[in-house]
Amino acid sequence: MRAPANTGDTSAASGFSGSDRPLWEVYSKCIHCGLCLNHCPTYRELGVEMDSPRGRIYQMALVDEGRLALAERFVQHIDLCLDCRACETACPAGVLYGKLVEAARAQIEQHYRRPLVARMARRVFYDCLLVSPPLLKLAGRLLWLYQASGAQKMARRSGLLRVLGLARIEALAPESQPPFFFSQLGKTYPAVGERRYRVAFFAGCIANVSFARLNEASVRVLAANGCEVVIPASQGCCGALHVHAGRREEARRLARRNLDAFLAEPFDAIINNAAGCGSTLKEYGELLDGDGRDAERARLFVSRMKDITEFLAEIGLVQRLGAVAARATYQDSCHLGHAQRVRAAPRELIRSVPGIEFQELPLADICCGSAGIYNVVHNELSMSLLKKKMEAISATGAGLVLTANPGCLLQLRAGVAQWGNGQRVLHVVELLDESLRAM
Ligand code: SF4
Ligand code: SF4
């Protein structure tokens, strides 16, 4: 079978290779009922069948059969998918859409030649920045200089960013938070009071720089609830963004490194606070399927892997919580709600905080438009989703917006700045930390 290329030659389209090949049964599970369509953010926005789950599955099957060229139009429809997996939740036939879109992206990555600038940008971002702590630190320091020196304020006020067409993207830049969490790698924090569990904490990659305070709060909340928290030194990027971009070989390399870091000791659980990373960490078994000993190690790793909200709700909070007076609402992170099916735990934790008046958010499980770097590469569509999300949030009257993923935090904060009423946006764990400190 010839390798497909973006030539418009349909005979060049081919299937997936090795363990990334989704079986025909996965496509054929789709009964074309269309029940997923109204749950799909891109279909809701664009009203185009080819940008719906059903339409995308149809195109993938055609490409796999060699009846549709693996060319620009197909790539655009697949690129436009948020990989939010809302369609999986909605699907009565159990179609595992996430697997399909990730495999399609791997196929595109292997056989489609993107423009040179896009290829270079992807290479720098995925192969250099995400996987290199020294580069992340350097980028964090430069970002800090830009933000703390007043250059950011000046650039925003002067209108320069607008002239350069960068204003909307720049508004999404994370805050650089020195001291970076990299300095915590290799440390162990004792449990407060009697030790109930010994857990390992997964710190992420960019989060070490931009969510250092969230990571610290996570460690404090775990320790306060009887966990000895070990932060393995040799851990690194989980590979989630690589998987979503179809760069599965790099993701496998990163996964093996994390297996070495986290399986060195028999922890009761491996905890992470970023739903986007968590869903990939929980899917290491599939990523390394057929990989001999690593497949077995991956299964052990996955059996220990927990989102922090899931873990805390399971073990129960033992420290008394202080009051945080606020009306609060909660936005499901797609990769926690749809991919990990963790929905009750964060709500349970929020409701456990004295003083919180909880108000459900209508359509809380529809993506806010963050989706990794989707808000940067598909900014217009992402902002349209965010605007609607902010209208729904404002209608709840909540002054506190909670979520469980750093990417969603950034997106919702940008939403508050542009369309909000001054709402505070926090991770569920930050609320718990604040509540503990209120005691
Ligand atoms: S993953 Fe999300 S954006 Fe993609 S097809 Fe499914 S519902 Fe639509
Ligand atoms: S809900 Fe499931 S079976 Fe129905 S069209 Fe969507 S993916 Fe196919």
Image (cartoon, grey):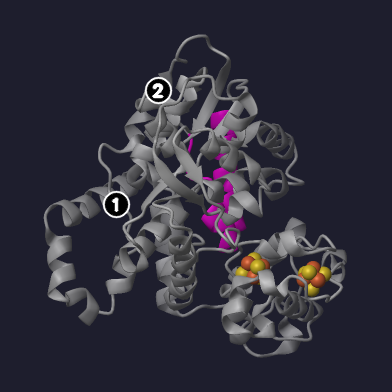
Label 1, residues with CA under 10 Å away: few <14, some 14-19, many ≥20: some
| 399 left or right of 152 in image | right
Compared with 377, 285 (above or below) is above
Quarter in which the C terminus is drawn: top left
Q: Is residue 216 above or below residue 206?
A: above
**Can you tell which quarter of the image residue 77 is in?**
bottom right
Which segment is the magenta one?
A: 235-262
**Residue shown at 57%/67% (left/top)?**
82
Q: Which mark is residue 175?
A: 1
Residue, disc 2? 187
Q: Which residue is nearer to you in this view: 376 or 434?
A: 434
Q: Viewer-proximal residue, 172 or 283?
A: 172
Q: Is residue 165 in view from this perspective? A: yes
**Residue 131 to residue 8: above or below:** above
Q: Is residue 253 magenta?
A: yes
Q: Which is more N-terminal, label 1 or label 2?
A: 1
Residue 31 is situated, as x and y percent measured from the top left of the image, at 87, 73
Estimate the x, y position of residue 195 in percent, counting from the top left. 53, 12
Q: Position of residue 310 (x, y in %)?
A: 61, 36
By secondary structure, the bulk of the magenta-drawn segment is best described as helix
Q: Nearer the viewer, residue 416 or 200?
A: 416
SS category of the residue bearing label 1: loop
Quarter, ligand 2: bottom right
- With 39 as the anchor, is 240 left or right in this view? left
In this view, the residue farthest toward the bottom is 8
Tell me where residue 298 appears, x and y as whole percent.
Answer: 68, 38
Which one is in front in this view, the residue at disc 2 or the one at disc 1? Answer: 1
> Quarter holding the N terminus?
bottom right
Work out how far the residue at label 2 is from the one at label 1, CA to CA, in angstroms.
24 Å
